[in-house]
Image: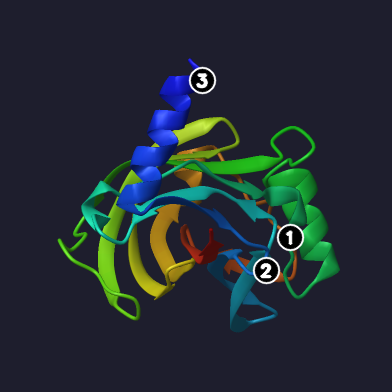
Amino acid sequence: MKKLILGLILVFGSLGFAQFKLTDASEARFYINEVLLGKDKQVIGVTSLVTGEVNFDLANPQATTVGTISIDASDLSTDDSRRNSQIRNRILQTSQFQFITFSPTEITGIPETVAVGDSFDVEITGDLTIKETTQSATFSTNVTVVSETELSGLGSTTIEYADYGINIPKVPLVARVDQEVKLELLFVATK
């Protein structure tokens, strides 16, 4: 068994295959529009508590795989502490459903060749799970090969929160909240 593992390490190492981990410079964000005190407002929620891995080979970029991305929803913060409390306690119920996950099943659009400094657009489709509800989602993602040891990029998709069993409570100061939510993952991954 040791020989098999050592052999795989040697083969993948010689091919340039590497595992990149998301760093704490990565961020998950959501954007949703509401009418607050009679004025249109875009609410932005952000957390840097994001984990995940990308297997990438500069010599064979089409062999790229992305592992499950995990977002700690209990850390999502907006510009208002009362809203943050509502998100954690009533909307996402993070004491029960702490993590939002995205498990990729397909990546399309990866070029055959890539060099350090190149950027390219891909579609990453997978299973997005929020509050134990899983739906298929596709993130349009721009990836930059910063160096042989760093990848960065931005992926985004739009969902409807009701599809995930999410209810937003009515409060007197908020006249309306849009159904659509834009989700983004700004990532920095290093070897």
Amino acid carrying label 2: it is Val
Image coords of residue 168 (percent x, y): 63, 51
What amino acid type is highlighted by mark number 3? Lys
In space, the residues marked 2 and 1 are separated at their CA atoms by 6 Å
Residue at the spot of label 2: 174
The residue that appears at 70% across and 56% down in the rendered structure is 49
Reading the image, the residue beneath label 1 is 171
Snapshot colouring: rainbow
Looking at the image, do the residues carrying marks 1 and 3 touch, with CB atoms under 8 Å apart? Answer: no
**Residue 85, quarter of the rendered image:** bottom right
Vertical order, 7 against 71 (above or below): above
Query: Can you say whether 160 is above or below 118 in the image?
Result: above
Gap between marks 3 and 2, in whole Å? 61 Å
Q: Residue furthest front?
A: 3
Residue at the image position 51 percent from the left and 48 percent from the top: 53
> Circle 1 sits in a helix, a strand or a loop, which is it?
loop
Instruction: Please report the residue visible at 68 percent of the width from the left and 47 percent of the height from the top.
Output: 91
Q: Which mark is residue 2?
A: 3
Can residue 136 be seen by looking at this rendering?
A: no
Of marks 3 and 2, which one's residue comes earlier in the chain?
A: 3
Q: Position of residue 25 (x, y in %)?
A: 64, 69
Do labels 2 and 1 touch, CB within 8 Å? Answer: yes
Please state the total of marks drawn on the protein image: 3
In this rendering, position of residue 66 left or right of residue 118: right
- Residue 97 vs residue 15, the one in the foreground: 15
SS for dot 3: helix
Q: Residue at x 51, y 20 (%)?
A: 2
